[in-house]
Amino acid sequence: MQRSVSRARRTGRRRSALAAAVSGLAVFVTYALAVTTPSATATAAAAVCGTANVALNRPATASSVENSRLSAANAVDGGATTRWSSAFSDPQWLQVDLGASTDVCEVVLTWQTSYAKAFQIQVSPDGVGNWSSLYSTATGSGGTQTIPVSGTGRFLRVYGTTRATGYGYSIFELVVHSGSTPTTPPPTTAPPATGPPIPGGGDLGSNVIVFDPSMSSSSIQSKLDQVFATQEKNQFGTQRYALLFKPGSYTGLNAQLGFYTSIAGLGQNPAGVQISGDVTVDAGWMAGNATQNFWRSAENMSITPVSGRDRWAVAQAAPFRRMDVHGGMTLASPNCGWASGGYIADSRISGTVSPCSQQQWYTRDSQVGGWNGGVWNVVFSGVAGAPANTFPTPPYTVVPKTPVSREKPYLYTDSSGAYRVFVPSLRTNSSGVTWAAGNTAGTSLPLTQFYVAHPGDSAATINSALAQGLNLLFTPGVYHVGQTVNVTRPDTVVLGLGFATLIADNGVTAMKVADVNGVKVAGLLFDAGTTRSPSLLQVGQSGANADHAANPISLQDVFLRVGGAGPAAVTNALVVNSNNTIIDHIWAWRADHGAGAGWTTNPSDTGLVVNGAAVTALGLFVEHFQKYNVIWNGNGGRTIFFQNELPYDPPSAAAWSHDGITGYAAYKVANSVTSHEAWGLGSYCVFTADPSIAAYHSFEVPVNPNVRFHDVLTVSLGKGSITHVINDTGDAALPSSVTPHNVISYP
């Protein structure tokens, strides 16, 4: 009986245990289902906490610093050995501007031994008030703390109230992970379009002026002169023009080009448009001084100059592409005057090129009959007929082949007279022109595959067209962009005519390109607005890591301006996050003259930030930014030709110093970079507000045998000085002698 009772009890216990197990399993299954098939909100929360550090190199401030070498910026620079440290008192805080309202999901703090025992993590929409606490502790452990949080704000700060030691608070790195940054790559196709279909193609607008061979030379010349009269001195005006010539022959013309004027042939190759005459840039409006002859271009024509020599006296942002010159060229005014930089690509000049007063120049993948002189920095890559490498006397830097390039897309007409856009193919280890043996290799797209934008079109309409799968053609004019133009589809072509200009309103980034293959952005001017933007153009999202070696994103003749036309502000003009991107001729300019130029009137930290790996820059012009002009964080980068002026207007050495160093380098390669190479780089100073400033150096790089610089120079233009060329190497450029100070090879 006892055995039966015991057996019954055991059986009951088994049944109870089994029931509990089943019940527990049901609860577990229910929980598992809840976890694996959550609500949309929960799915979003779980899926979108990214791994990218959205605080990296963002503007940082602090309640105090122990000394100038321990600045707030050190805590967001990605470096494991640099740090911020506060004064020895409570409370203290470190704050970072994330650039836009951001969903924050995780904060990682790496403390030095002087850590916080009690602190909060807070967010705010404006950085001056309305702080909300996301995390609070009175038992901080120091070391590396990974802290899950949930909240939204543009500004994030670490607010310390109790120190663990008698010293200040000290943080090696503050890392912020955003809930709005996916951990997986973005979709490679555009989102579904909404609304009625948007047609491609259409009229090019009244500021595209088209000539054909049936027109008289006098009528063509009259129109050319009319445009030039409007644009000769119109440096900061809103008028934009594209002068297009249909295939055929033209005689007796002199096309003088002023500001925001492009001239181009509509043949598939340069031989399609034959001009017996000149395409001229001079500087009569400045008594022969060509240093402000910006924003004009010539493309895809064959010209036979009347005198045997064409004049192209330009400064920055004045590309000369796909041109066939039957004769020579002069790159300055008749009296030589002053001239300051230019760019030739995919062109053939049968005669000799005479730079005269040109201070610097870059010629790529072209052919010249000869080259005669240069002032400070003349660089060639992939140029048949280039002189020998003789830097610094004469100052020729020669790279035999361009490692990777893609020529700019261009508008042309087919045999039926219909407009098309030709997209040249990628080239590696290239030299000479693409069209010497026939048509340039590439792809032809009908205009019907493009949304033809006109001034007044909204960013919403443009985005709808892009989402629909159309490419984008901006006709000449000024476009106010109140929301970001998002380019998300692989191989999208975004092409501007006549220096079409996008102004970033409301503090937005004017254009973002997704981390996808083969997007081409060309022929655009990006202008900062009055409300500070985090950037003007961003390529790839933060943390982008896809390999685009077979089909890179490319930027060609992309110009970025902060001020000049009026007050303006942006943190970083151009940010490149995508690997393998090709940067082919940019000018990022914080204005040193014009209505919007002043230390507090057009603030901007950096012209170019490169975070992607294996990025190649072919012709960098970056000038006058208030901190580093270029910051290169990605490995495997290459630059061929760099031209820079440091900011004119730092109010004092004290106001323009960091970490105990006077000034910011023009070109900084991050300490974490282990491979980088650059050829032909020049940086100049003219400190007009405080001529006593002595910048420590213009080039700051890690000392590593795989970080190599060739033919580097600095010059003082008579006000202020630069103590070294690169790191601690090179002698001082002093105002008493406007001569280059050279380092031929580093290290």
Image (cartoon, helix red, strand yellow):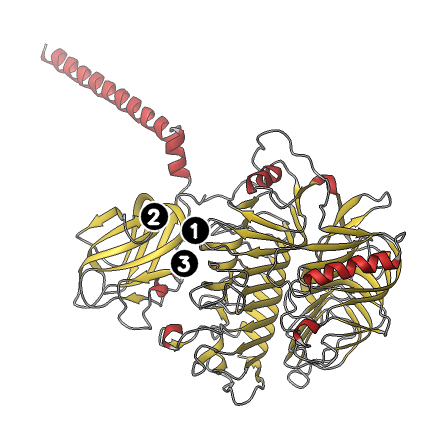
Q: Label 3, on which residue?
A: 58
Residue 40 in percent (x, y) is at 41, 30
Per the model, the C-alpha gap separating discs 2 and 1 is 21 Å
Note whether residue 442 is visible. Answer: yes
At label 1, counting other C-alpha atoms closer than 10 Å, the crowd grade (few under 14, some 14-19, many 20 or more) is some
Residue 598 vertical placement versus 217 (above, below): below
Identify the mark nearer the N-term, 1 or 3: 1
Res. 52 mark: 1
Q: Mark 2 or mark 3, which is nearer the start of the sequence?
A: 3
Q: Which one is closest to the eye, mark 2 or mark 1?
A: 2
Task: Name the disc covering residue 125, or none.
Answer: 2
Residue furthest to the bottom: 736
> Depth-wise, is mark 1 or mark 3 nearer the camera?
3
Label whose residue precedes the other's in the sequence (2 or 1): 1
Q: How many marks?
A: 3
Give above or below for 422 relative to 296.
above
